[in-house]
Amino acid sequence: MQVREADYTKPDTLNSAFKGANKVLLISSSEVGQRAEQHRNVIDAAKNQGVSLIAYTSLLHADTSPLLLAKEHLETEKYLQQSGVPFVLLRNGWYTENYLASVKPAIEYGAFIGSAGEGLISSATRDDYAQAAAVVITSATPQAGKVYELAGDESYTLAELAALISQQSGKTIPYVNLPEHEYKAALVGAGIPEPFAALLADSDKGALNAGLFDNQGALSALIGRPTTRLSESLKAVIN
């Protein structure tokens, strides 16, 4: 195994990192608002080094998603198409960890807040998605041109999540649904940077329009096992 520096903002490091590479797994940047440019740097470097495949972690149903997060993912998908480099799309759904971070505060303050209403969320863990990426990038079966819409086997509302938290913690934790702007303000008040708080609140709102829902089972089929149950993920946080 070789470890090489690969900085999304420094094309020279990317060109060096990809020398001799056959396939590249492009995991979407965490810097919302700068993602598209950073992803272009990766794609350009991969093309320069003649890689045979790029696997990109995009967003669930990116081409129809109501989420603001979809914009930069779509820009990246279009750039991949224009690049001429063979690619496969791993359109990841919501991460269970996005909500697990709120579990302990919910128990402490006696309520789980959000603005998803009765929207269904088909989340999976980072480990689930990581295994799917590993399967695809190491597969001997040709992957170029494939689009995987990846999501958890379970779909739940935030009220159902709150009920599970109540069951496992032994405390009554109701779900309190807030208007999007109030939820955003609450996140900012909890110390989350305003731009990211806005995206989280928008994503909750998007759940009402099926932005976080999928029931096709492509993720579990790809990894050869059921996705991690929500109750199991909660146990690791609560216990």
Image (cartoon, rainbow, N blue to C red):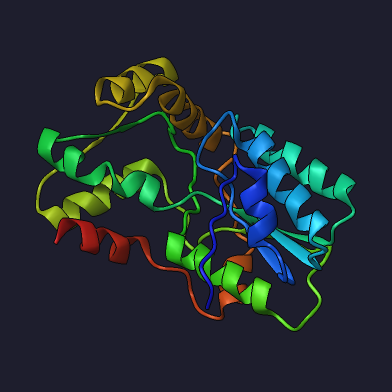
Q: Residue drawn 56% across and 76% down?
A: 223
The reply, left or right, for residue 182 in relation to residue 3 is left
Which residue is at the front of the view, 145 or 117? 145
Which residue is at the front of the view, 5 or 56? 5
The reply, left or right, for residue 181 in relation to residue 237 is right
Could you tell me if residue 201 is visible in this image? yes
Q: Residue 78: where, in percent of width, then height? A: 81, 42
The reply, left or right, for residue 187 in relation to residue 29 is left
Q: Residue drawn 67% across and 45% down?
A: 11
Q: How many marks?
A: 0
Quarter assignment of residue 214: bottom right
Q: Residue 68: where, in percent of width, then height? A: 60, 29
Q: Does 148 sit above or below residue 170?
A: below
The reply, left or right, for residue 40 in relation to residue 38 is right
Could you tell me if residue 58 is visible in this image? no
Q: Residue furthest bottom?
A: 140
Q: Residue drawn 66% across and 48% down?
A: 12
Q: Quadrant of the C terminus?
A: bottom left
Q: Residue 193: where, in percent of width, then height? A: 37, 24
Q: Does 23 sit above or below residue 70?
A: below
Which residue is at the front of the view, 171 or 193? 193
Q: Does 204 sit above or below residue 147?
A: above
Q: Residue 20: where, in percent of width, then height? A: 72, 71
Q: Residue drawn 13% across and 43% down?
A: 172
